Amino acid sequence: LRQVIHEKTLIDLTSDAANVKGQIVICILIPDLLSDEVHRFLRSVKARAASTTLFVSCTEDVARQLPILYPMVRFTFHPSLGKYQDPTSGLLHPKDELTRMGLWASFLLEGPSLLRIALDSGARAAWLMDVRTVLLAPLPTFEESVQVSLGISEAAGGSFDSGLAYFASQNKVDKWIQAVQAKGESAQADLDVFKGDPDVKALASGVGVGRTWA
């Protein structure tokens, strides 16, 4: 498991970005800079969490551009998303195409693998966010080792949403990784592996982290 995660390379483009021991960090996948949501998220980080290090899974092009566009944000880059990208549009391939290519499970592992790297780097805890997230206040901390958000769709049976979650446990991250690896290309983009886990709590409203939905 550890070999699978660490065979990928981190690129640090700020002098102290990797010095995260004891800190709360943010992990996020940013495949491109085409959406307004990406820039709204980064502006909210700059305004409310400027000292927080962002571990970013992205393409090499995004890794080059972000420090120029947001010089006050602390980044640590993990340029691993290029293989999921349509070379013509510059966007991520849809799920059915990634599945056809045998890359869906690999893509789902990008988030938890980034969490594992952040925690291995000494972070006390790591938030996993997607680009629909907006910081409304400084990041909170929790006593529980994992906090997850509930999906907005009632039809999903209240599925735990992997787009916004807080992890302070390497073992819980490993549990998620192992669940995806076991299911392979049939894995789903949720955190239902944690349903019934007494250590995992649903995020309450009012924690200072917002989401937008299409």
Image (spheres, rainbow, N blue to C red):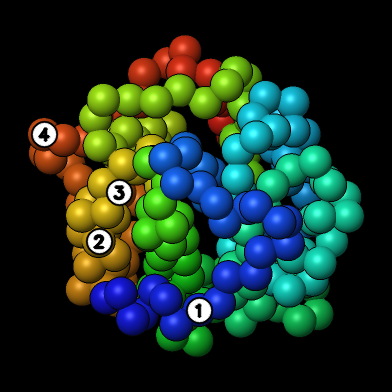
**Which amino acid, by three-letter code, is at mark 3?**
Leu
* Residue type beneath disc 4: Pro
Q: Is residue 5 left or right of residue 137?
A: left
Give the residue displayed 47% in from the left and 37% down from the top: 24
Disc assigned to residue 191: 3
Residues under labels 3 and 2: Cα distance?
A: 12 Å
Q: In this view, does 57 lie above or below 157?
A: below
Q: Which of marks 1 and 3 is nearer the N terminus?
A: 1
The residue pinned by badge 1 equals: 8
Give the structural element (helix, strand or loop) at label 4: loop
Note whether residue 209 is visible. Answer: yes
Nearer the observer: mark 3 or 2; the answer is 2
- Residue 89 location, x and y as percent? 79, 73
What residue did someone put label 2 on?
Answer: 174
User: Looking at numbered disc 2 in the image, what kind of residue is underneath it?
Assistant: Asp
Residue closer to the observer: 158 or 73: 73
Disc 3 or 4, which lies upstream in sequence?
3
Q: In the picture provided, is 103 more to the left or to the right than 82?
A: left
Residue at screen point 47% across, 39% down: 23
Reading the image, the residue beneath label 4 is 198
Question: Mark 2 or mark 4, which has the lower sequence index?
Answer: 2
